[in-house]
Image (cartoon, rainbow, N blue to C red):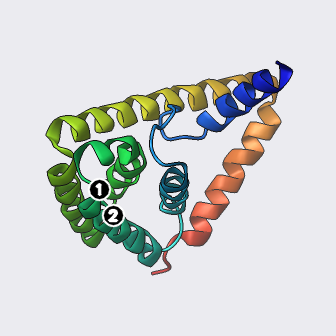
């Protein structure tokens, strides 16, 4: 009986890392691959992001409708983030992949997944702001160091003219 409780706790912990914190009802292996691709798409080079977006487009053409629905939350998040990019190539690719995903999954499914992602993103932003406010009260020196480190990083990455 204790083993069942432990496995339920582990499942809850694992779900917190999922795009919307929801349990996905697809193939465990495919869920793992989508999860890894989603995580990998959030950082790094444009080449890697574009390759992952192309993979999303390719796999979307094979999985249609109900088969694709469990994995939409993994696809929509990186698409929304890429569509906000300042680079025209990123925006164009995001638009192309979005069209492919909408055609495969259907407008209602895609719209629902996009709305879920935006709600999740807003909740995460509220949590981050609350954490920063608490840090400002409890550890102002730590917050100041964090801000200085962020500014130095931005200065370092700023293009020299």
In the image, taking residue 25 as reference, residue 12 lies left or right, namely right
Identify the element where label 2 is drawn: helix
Relative to 105, does residue 38 appear above or below in the rendering? below
Task: Return the residue nearer the eye: 64 or 16.
Answer: 64
Q: What residue would you read off at disc 1?
A: 63
Quarter of the figure with residue 32: bottom right
Residue 94 in sight: no
Seen at 74% across and 41% down, the residue is 144
Instruction: Estimate the x, y position of residue 105 in percent, counting from the top left.
Output: 22, 47
Q: Residue 62's image quarter?
A: bottom left
Picture coordinates of residue 76 (x, y %)? 34, 48
In this rendered view, identify the residue nearer to me: 59 or 41.
59
The residue tagged with tag 1: helix, strand or loop?
loop
Crowd tier of the residue under label 2, counting other residues whose Cα lies within 10 Å: few below 14, some 14–19, many 20 or above:
some
User: Is residue 75 positioned above or below 157 on the image?
Assistant: above
Please, which residue is most extreme toward the front here? 1
Q: Is residue 25 visible?
A: yes
Q: Pinpoint residue 131: horizontal percent, then vertical percent.
A: 66, 28
Mark 1–mark 2 CB contact (< 8 Å) = yes
User: Residue most toward the right?
Assistant: 2
Q: Kindly identify the residue that appears in the image at 30 percent across and 68 percent down.
A: 58
Q: Nearer the viewer, residue 121 or 105?
A: 105
Q: Position of residue 52 (x, y in %)?
A: 41, 68
Q: Is residue 56 positioned above or below 110 on the image?
A: below
> Left or right: where does residue 126 sit relative to residue 74?
right
Res 59 label: 2
Q: Residues within 10 Å of mark 1 (few under 14, many from 20)?
A: some
Judged from this view, the residue extending furthest toward the top is 1
Q: Where residue 35 is drawn, which disc sits there?
A: none
Q: Residue at x 45, y 81 (%)?
A: 161
Residues 124 and 40: in front is 40
């Amino acid at each position: 009986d204790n083993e069942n409780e432990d496995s339920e706790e582990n499942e809850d912990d694992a779900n917190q890392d999922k795009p919307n914190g929801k349990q996905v009802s697809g193939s465990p292996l495919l869920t793992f691959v989508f999860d890894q691709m989603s995580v990998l798409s959030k950082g790094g080079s444009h080449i890697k992001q574009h390759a992952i977006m192309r993979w999303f487009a390719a796999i979307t053409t094979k999985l249609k409708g109900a088969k694709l629905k469990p994995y939409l939350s993994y696809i929509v998040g990186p698409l929304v983030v890429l569509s906000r990019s300042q680079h025209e190539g990123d925006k164009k690719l995001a638009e192309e992949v979005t069209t492919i995903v909408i055609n495969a999954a259907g407008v209602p499914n895609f719209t629902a997944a996009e709305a879920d992602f935006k709600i999740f993103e807003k909740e995460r932003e509220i949590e981050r702001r609350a954490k920063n406010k608490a840090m400002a009260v409890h550890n102002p020196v730590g917050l100041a160091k964090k801000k200085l480190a962020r500014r130095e990083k931005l200065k370092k990455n700023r293009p020299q003219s």
